[in-house]
Image (cartoon, grey):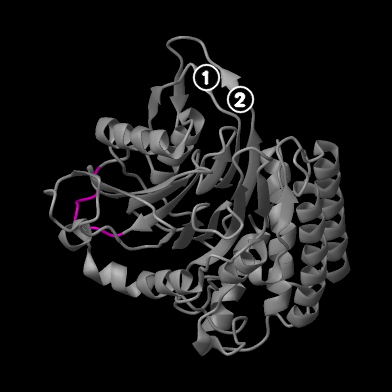
Amino acid sequence: MCDTFSIMANWSEADITYFAKNSDRSPNEPHLVLHIPGTHHEKGAKVKCTYIEIPQAGYTREMILYKPSWIWGAEMGVNEARVAIGNEAVFTKSKKGKSALTGMDMLRLALERADNAASAVEILIMLLETYGQGGNCGYDHAFYYDNSFLASDPKEAYVLETSGRNYAVMRVENKYAISNCLSIEKNHINRSGIGPGDSFANRFTEPVYTYFSAAKARRRSVLDSLTASAGAAEIFGILRGHNARLNGKEFSRGSVKSVCMHGGGLVGDHTTGSLVAVLRPEKPVTLWSTGASTPCISAFKPVFWGSGAAPVFEDPMASREYWLKREQLHRAVIAGKVNAGLLRGKIKSLETEWMLRESRIMSDNKPDTDMLLALSGEASKQEQELIDEFYDRSWEDLKGKGRFISFWNKKNRDLLNA
């Protein structure tokens, strides 16, 4: 499960395009944040994706990817051309075929090749038509689905929704959100498998899985929260949003209806990583990244191209260890070893300082790159000090009974052996 959304510059009071996503996956699945350098490839080269091999491009763009540790592709990412893409699992009537490209593979391939949001969608369609989509995308259980995508750049954004090899495309006006449900009705500008006046969502939605994903409720809560005045702080709040019925019980009950999804009991998915991308056309892009699960108790750190500071890594194992340390802190919160309110208060104080500094630097016509890189490095250091302050080594010790406790005790045992 996931939620992805964008606010367009022509609607935003700040005249800036924002892209954001929570990646909801298995709670024990490490979510890596990796810098991938731009690379030239020999003619005839191949690239091995998660399940299949396809021809490589002559040049693959520099990217920052946010990805499950074991899959070649990514849940979200941004490339050197200021293109951001996120994908969603969608449940459709199409039969699931043999292993092909996963939606995450398609996303990474598009980021490698695209120079704007429109070309990203064209590449995604080409990949879909040429290779198809398919293969298990579950970390610790089998999970098969089709995909939708939101591709944004500083000027435009497009949504591509799929069912098997069928698809529909729409151009985003003002704001848009996608979740684990088909949302394109008759407002498509390109399509396959339906006529010009047909509803893609009505034609291909599988109703049972879609209903139990609670995607429509989460999507509606996002859209209702998006305003033209929203900036990074407000978007952090949306990604941290919980269903009202939790009433402060997010660490004792799972909730599939929360944008900040908490696993437990019957809820198997959990928010494992979060991104807010500020896509400026001329000035540097800011990537506010958690590098951690559970955004309601994780800090969004400012990342800039070339900063080289955590939570972005070159080495997948270093990224994995970074994520695991913060995941253990989350488990300590569940176990009652860490005061979530106190942790949140300190995170808010740090984020307020970082956002103020970022805003001041970006207010210049030509923002000072060295100052941005220094901010990124200092934020990384301050957040690490916070993690060290709150970390509790007895994170796996959950007391009590019930389905929620049993769920997390098993996850803790598995995490210890990972």
Q: Residues within 10 Å of mark 1 (few under 14, many from 20)?
A: few
Instruction: Give the main secondary structure of the magenta stretch.
Output: loop
Amino acid type, callout 2: Gly
Image quadrant in which you'd find residue 328:
bottom right
Q: Which mark is residue 59?
A: 1
Q: Residues within 10 Å of mark 2 (few under 14, many from 20)?
A: some
Residue 294 highlighted magenta (yes or no): no
* Circle 1/circle 2 CB separation < 8 Å: yes
Amino acid type, callout 1: Tyr
Q: Secondary structure at mark 1?
A: strand
* Quadrant position of the C terminus in the picture: bottom right
First in residue order: circle 1 vs circle 2: 2
Give the total of numbered labels. Answer: 2
Image quadrant in which you'd find residue 214:
bottom left
* Quadrant position of the N terminus in the picture: bottom left
Residue 92 highlighted magenta (yes or no): yes
Q: Is residue 33 visible?
A: yes
Percent across and percent down for residue 187 are 24, 55
Q: Label 1 vs label 2: CA separation?
A: 7 Å
Q: Residue at x 45, y 33 (%)?
A: 109
Q: Is residue 404 left or right of residue 365?
A: left
Q: Tell me: residue 334, above or below residue 59.
A: below
Q: Which mark is residue 38?
A: 2
Percent across and percent down for residue 85 are 48, 45
What span is colored magenta in the figure?
A: 91-97
Q: Residue at x 65, y 58 (%)?
A: 417
Q: Secondary structure at mark 2?
A: loop
